[in-house]
Amino acid sequence: MYNVGNLVKELAEKHGRRRDSLIPILQGIVEKHNYLTDEAMVEVAKELDISAAEVYGTASFYSFLDTEPRGKYVIRVCKTITCMMKGKNDILQTLEDMLKIKIGETTPDRMFTLLETNCIGWCHKAPAMLINEIPYTELTPEKVVEILKSYMKK
Amino acid sequence: MAETGLNKVDLIFEQVNPKDVLKKAYEMTSEEIIKEILESGLKGRGGAGFPTGLKWKYTAAEKDPEKYVVCNADEGEPGTFKDREILDRVAYKVYCGMAIAGLAIGAKQGYVYLRGEYKFLLPKLLKELESFHKILAETGYDFRITYRLGSGAYICGEESALFESIQGERGEPRNKPPYPTVSGLFFKPTVINNVETLVTAMMIIHHGAEAYRKLGTKDSRGSKVFSVSGDTPIPGIYELELGMTVQQFVNEFGDGDTKAVQVGGASGFCVPRKRFADTIIGFEGVPTGGSMKLFNSSRSMYNVLHNYLEFFTEESCGQCTPCRVGCQQLLKGIEKVKKGEVKSSYLNELMKLADTMKLASKCGLGQSVGNAFKTIVENFREEIIY
């Protein structure tokens, strides 16, 4: 749970209170808190003077506007064709073993969430994944271990 | 690439002075700019291939004082990554193309809709945008560009879904007509072009339509940036003259064992080996937004098709029934055939479903699922069944 009132006001000052400000505001909340709580969506609805259902309806359409609790670092492994051909299953296996969670789950310390995603545009350097917005490419299980270790130290 | 007969081109990534090109465009009338783009024969580089000059002409003809230029950088087609490369290396040319489109149609505001997966590029792109806005200020031209980020939805690459998304709504495509040239972003006349199209248009103004027309074929003028991936020793970005056959392409990029090439991504067409020699990559044969995936004989085409159908099932916006239910049924259908739960002739029923989706779906997503489905099932039927 997080207190989002001030952040919503700040974001509304920055992006405006029009309907087309909605997605930039939601993106701003996710950037800071990794996902959207019900409270956050209600707060945004009040600020923009629209129905909370409109906010939820919009947010739930977009896969990066999570409405489920997410960890500090959201790992999205590309599962589309080239990454599949080039061994994304080994990458997933390595991540699952290291984090001791399955796809769709979050570690108990709320540090990592493991997800799959559709093509992220790195087919020539497959397999690839995103950790929050940072892309990692030409992955091998060994490389994944190193990358994850560096995040665990943060 | 002489031995394979492919002609490498350096138009998109060629460094030019944006000020010079802007000045040149500035001295032209709107009609002259549009005439130049029309004469070049340029067709949209995002995949659909609508003549760019016509889009600009129709939008210019609208009387509304409020118009928009939108750059579609929601590059989500599996196997396409050229727009990221273009933005990364020559963003100023994209901005310049937008400003020229603005001059042509009479718009003062542009939007770049960048897919959320490319958010890591944004700080750099904004910095370059700032420099570009300075150049505009120096030349005294009133035009501003704003960035909007996507949030992980393939469908937002569909133009009207993209407008909805910028407007803060669910990315659900609109009914057409009206087309964007009449009612686009904020329901105002809008030119929406792919990243590469805008850069190409800018280079046409720079070099002239005459020079551009010398490249390519009658139906596919000019050159195109290809995103090459899959079973190839040299994956990456290549700018090539249009008009080559799939065979020529495979000779250059294949690993010696290529059995099929998927041209145009998951929504494109599968070309099997026996058709390599007589299939032209372009609007007279198989069109592509750039995605070229090679598969060698170690790959199961069932797995390829299954992956594509999973992709579409997840990415369908769910608004219209033919696409929402159709994608699910095609996916379940090939699974049943594979498991032997239904006769292989069930594939014929699925082919009819793919045809229905093409006719009845509201937008390009549902309409193009059948492209890959039909070309893979027709050419690799035994791999789907056994």
Image (cartoon, grey):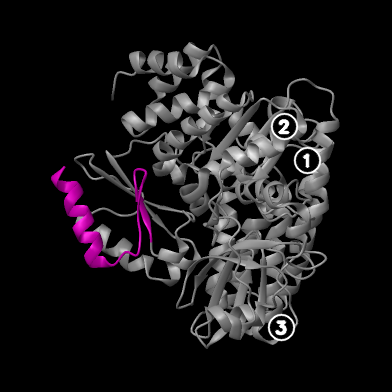
- Discs 2, 1 touching: Cβ within 8 Å: yes
Locate residue A17 relative to residue B198 in the image: left or right.
left
Q: Quick one: label 2 or label 1, which is nearer the N terminus?
A: 1
Q: Can residue B177 be seen from the camera position used here?
A: no
Looking at the picture, does residue B239 appear above or below residue B119?
below
Question: Label 2 belongs to which residue?
Answer: B103
Q: Is residue B325 magenta?
A: no
In the rendered structure, the residue with mark 2 lies on which chain? B
User: Residue A35 versus residue A120: which sits nearer the camera?
Assistant: A120
Closest to the camera, between mark 3 and mark 1, is: 1
Q: Quick one: label 3 or label 1, which is nearer the N terminus?
A: 1
SS of the residue under disc 3: helix
- Discs 3, 1 touching: Cβ within 8 Å: no
Question: Label 3 belongs to which residue?
Answer: B275
Q: Quick one: label 3 or label 2, which is nearer the N terminus?
A: 2
Residue type of the residue flagged with mark 3: Arg
Looking at the picture, does residue B104 appear above or below residue B78?
above
Q: Can residue B223 be seen from the camera position used here?
A: yes
Q: Residues within 10 Å of mark 3 (few under 14, many from 20)?
A: some
User: What is the span of residues highlighted in magenta in the rendered image?
Assistant: A128-154
Residue type of the residue flagged with mark 2: Leu
Question: Label 1 belongs to which residue?
Answer: B33
Labels 2 and 1 within one chain: yes
Residue type of the residue flagged with mark 1: Ile
User: Residue A19 versus residue B18: which sits nearer the camera?
Assistant: B18
SS of the residue under disc 1: helix
Task: Give the spatial CA distance, label 3 vs label 1.
Answer: 40 Å
